[in-house]
Image (cartoon, grey):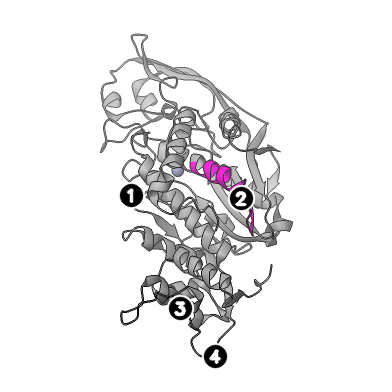
């Protein structure tokens, strides 16, 4: 069994604590869709797994897009009429609108206000805003701070560079028995926001670290890249090889207290969709299973009609569906190890279904074979068979080479892992054998 040490949420608490510690390390870094913050972050993740960084030069055409200029920040602040800093990038990187162009100017409050963003409904939170692909600048601040600004002349300094450079992403490939791949994609472009997506980067890193020493059927490809332009760039560079991607999971927002949410692939009926539909409700009765929609994270690109890959998305709360989303309240208090542990387990269980969802063939299909002499049935008769015996009976009855273990688990109303274990018992007893896998 793939990663047999992780069967319950409690088993994943050690990993979750490691994820949380990693999240604390990378939380303060100022990231964007390009720039040194992404490189620095990937450098930290690279201490845990052997990541291969890729640099794609600005101006490179990628599908219908172009790799943008690289953006870096040295400093940014606003000084009030009395010369004191009223907004300071150094105290929180959310203060500067991402991709702001350089500015050095003095202006009246009325003009300054057209460049300021706040959240009146949450007066103590700093919003997160971006100005990708626009020649603009701006600052974000708490509504309370905005309201306290007095009339007068302000000094604005945005010391940024916005010039040809490159877009950075990183990959890790874990070869399996089959060249068919499972793609795990997570976005690396958000600054100090914990759930979105320090949590996803940490979890993907730890998942890769635990998968690396195991043997597995599929080849696993982990991609850490900025959202939208990152997946567009990756797809443009790997267009000839996307046929290898059997399944994929866009993963992010993995640590908050909201219920697990799986968004189906555009196709909706692939094995990863079926796996998630089976795994999530077994883990949490409040889990949400959502149909595909062309809005969200990088599943939009993997599921665009020209690729139409079997790629779903796993989050806890989804993008835009929690009050703290894209604000300074999405901080380390919003994520917790227990939620991270459950998300980690959901990933492991989905991958386990993909790995082990094979068909078996009953080698004694004429009549019900005797389980007792093979040590598979309780010796005392007269009572109903137990759960494990039920699983054996379901497997023996349904294993005609055409029904997968997942289909049998669904039909029997049993967790996949349990049915898989039962199939292994029957195989050991010589009652079933594995049918060859389709296409690999
Ligand atoms: Zn986001």
Instruction: Residue 24: give x, y in percent of width and height.
Output: 44, 30
Q: Earlier in the sequence, mark 3 or mark 2?
A: 2
- Ligand 1 quadrant in view: top left
Q: Earlier in the sequence, mark 1 or mark 2?
A: 2
Q: Which residues are magenta?
A: 203-222
* Residue 279 seen in the current view: yes
Residue furthest right in the image: 240
Determine which of the numbered discs, if any, sits on residue 214 in the image: 2
Mark 1 sits near ligand 1, with its Cβ under 8 Å away: no
Residue nearest the observer in this picture, 247 or 284:
284
Q: Is residue 179 magenta?
A: no
> Label 4 belongs to which residue?
366
Residue nearest the observer in this picture, 82 or 325:
325
Q: Is residue 221 magenta?
A: yes
Determine which of the numbered discs, if any, sits on residue 372 in the image: 3
Report how far apart the C-alphas of labels 3 and 4 lie in the structure.
Answer: 17 Å
Determine whether 30 is above or below 262 in the image. above
Instruction: Residue 413: give x, y in percent of width and height.
Output: 38, 73
Tag nearer the camera, 3 or 4: 3
Mark 2 element type: loop
């Amino acid at each position: 069994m793939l990663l047999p040490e992780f069967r319950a949420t409690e088993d994943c608490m050690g990993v979750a604590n490691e994820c949380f510690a990693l999240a604390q390390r990378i939380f303060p870094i100022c990231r964007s869709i390009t720039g040194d913050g992404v490189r620095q972050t990937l450098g930290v993740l690279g201490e845990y797994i052997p990541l291969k960084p890729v640099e794609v030069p600005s101006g490179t055409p990628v599908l219908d897009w172009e790799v943008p200029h690289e953006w870096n920040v040295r400093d940014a602040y606003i000084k009030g009429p009395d010369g004191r800093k009223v907004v300071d990038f150094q105290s929180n990187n959310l203060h500067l609108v991402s991709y702001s162009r350089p500015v050095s100017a003095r202006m009246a409050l009325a003009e300054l206000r057209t460049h300021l963003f706040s959240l009146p409904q949450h007066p103590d939170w700093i919003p997160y805003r971006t100005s990708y692909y626009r020649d603009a600048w701006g600052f974000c601040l708490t509504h309370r701070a905005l309201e306290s600004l007095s009339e007068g002349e302000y000094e604005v300094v945005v010391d940024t560079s916005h010039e040809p450079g490159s877009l950075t992403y990183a990959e890790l490939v874990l070869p399996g028995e089959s060249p068919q791949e499972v793609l795990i994609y997570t976005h690396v472009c958000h600054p100090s926001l914990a759930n979105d997506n320090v949590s996803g980067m940490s979890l993907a890193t730890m998942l890769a670290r635990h998968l690396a020493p195991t043997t597995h059927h599929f080849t696993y490809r982990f991609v850490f890249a900025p959202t939208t332009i990152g997946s567009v760039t990756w797809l443009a560079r790997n267009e000839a090889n996307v046929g290898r991607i059997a399944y994929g999971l866009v993963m992010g927002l993995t640590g908050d207290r909201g219920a697990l949410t799986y968004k189906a692939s555009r196709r909706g009926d692939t094995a990863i969709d079926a796996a998630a539909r089976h795994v999530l409700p077994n883990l949490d009765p409040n889990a949400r299973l959502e149909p595909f929609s062309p809005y969200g994270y990088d599943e939009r690109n993997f599921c665009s009609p020209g690729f139409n890959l079997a790629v779903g998305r796993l989050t806890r709360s989804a993008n835009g569906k929690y009050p703290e989303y894209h604000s300074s309240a999405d901080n380390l208090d919003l994520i917790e190890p227990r939620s991270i542990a459950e998300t980690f387990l959901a990933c492991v269980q989905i991958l386990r279904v993909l790995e082990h969802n094979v068909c078996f063939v009953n080698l004694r299909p004429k009549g019900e074979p005797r389980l007792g002499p093979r040590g598979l049935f309780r010796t005392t008769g007269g009572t109903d068979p137990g759960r494990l015996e039920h699983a054996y009976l379901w497997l023996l009855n349904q294993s005609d080479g055409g029904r997968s273990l997942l289909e049998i688990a669904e039909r029997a109303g049993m967790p996949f892992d349990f049915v898989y274990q039962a199939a292994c018992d029957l195989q050991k007893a010589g009652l079933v054998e594995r049918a060859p896998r389709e296409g690999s």
